[in-house]
Image: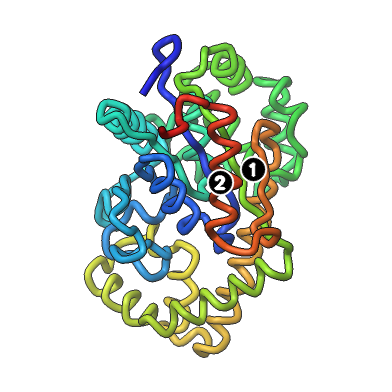
Amino acid sequence: MREESGKGPLVVLVGPTAVGKTAVAIELALALNGEVVTADSMQVYKGMDIGTAKPTPSEMKGVPHHLIDVVTPDTPFNVALYRDMAHRVIAEVHARGRVPIVSGGTGLYIRAVLDEFLFPDQGADPALRRRLQEMAAEHGPEHLYAMLVRVDPERAAELHPNDVRRVIRALEVYEVTGRPMSEHIREAKAKSPRYRDVRIGLIRPRSELYERINRRVDEQLRRGLVEEVKTLRSRYPLQDTALQALGYKEIIAFLDGECSLDEAVRRLKRETRRYAKRQLTWFRRDESITWFDLSRYPSLDAATDAIRSHVVKVLPELARP
């Protein structure tokens, strides 16, 4: 594989949940002599299979998949760990003369790999976060926003005063690092990119995507989602992070007698649709992504061919003889 300026090629495949990323990534890997590097913050956990829609061995079609089943649900994991693992795996794929395809829907993970900016999770202080959250609850979001204006007016200007989560994050960065978040962002943008990447986004019409979400939830129930949650909960009774993930917390509410199974399923479908909408909002901020509407292609093969053609146009060295 030819590399220019010492930078390896990288294919990035993003999109909302249930759009069809897994199938496209596998077919694209087969077409490009590639390996899939999963960018999913929940698929890193062992035993969380049905609820995270991990591909089965048969679905993988022999394509190597990385960064799935990395840690147990009771093991701390964050975006910093993911970034370091992803860079190492990508280097190993390049060394084998193959094409790494980063595929997933966790935007922060993908951003950490591509843009190098990383919220300093290693030094994050849970007590600080709780204190800031309590301040927001007691004094209102305007109080926190005023704090941010004083220490990082540049970042504050980019946020709405009611966006408490991002305001807290910016304040955390300042407290942990002693420097405004805006400085970290500027430095990250000034760095030369680590890879020569092509970014592909997958979409479908909203009604079609929502129907796919509903069908997938029904299939997860049929495959044993409730039993999976029961097993995980008995194995990791003190776990309070991974099992609060989408698809797990709703079933736990049912198991705790807070709602019926039908209500839990209704909530799960609703929250998954909302999550897909948030994912699209995140990815659409990246103007370098080229979008493909999968509904416009008669088959998966046709969609893969179109995407592959675009990829080799941007990175011609990936065209296989």
Element type where label 2 sits in the image: strand
Q: How are the colours assigned in the image?
A: rainbow
- Please tell me which residue lies in front, 95 or 304: 304
Quadrant assignment for the C terminus: top left
- Please tell me which residue lies in front, 94 or 314: 314
Residue at 75 percent across and 30 percent down: it is 158
- Please tell me which residue lies in front, 99 or 171: 99
- On the image, the x and y values in percent for residue 90 come to 34, 31
- The reply to whether callout 1 and callout 2 are in contact (CB within 8 Å) is yes
Q: Can residue 135 be seen?
A: no
- On the image, the x and y values in percent for residue 254 come to 46, 83
Say whether residue 172 is left or right of residue 87.
right
- Please tell me which residue lies in front, 279 or 290: 290
| Residue behind mark 1 | 283
* Residue 287, quarter of picture: top right
| Residue behind mark 2 | 14
Residue 121 - label: none
Residue at 64 percent across and 57 percent down: it is 294
Residue at 68 percent across and 29 percent down: it is 147
- As displayed, is residue 256 above or below residue 159? below
Q: Earlier in the sequence, mark 1 or mark 2?
A: 2
Q: Can residue 11 be seen?
A: yes
* Residue 215, quarter of picture: bottom right
Say whether residue 135 is left or right of residue 90.
right
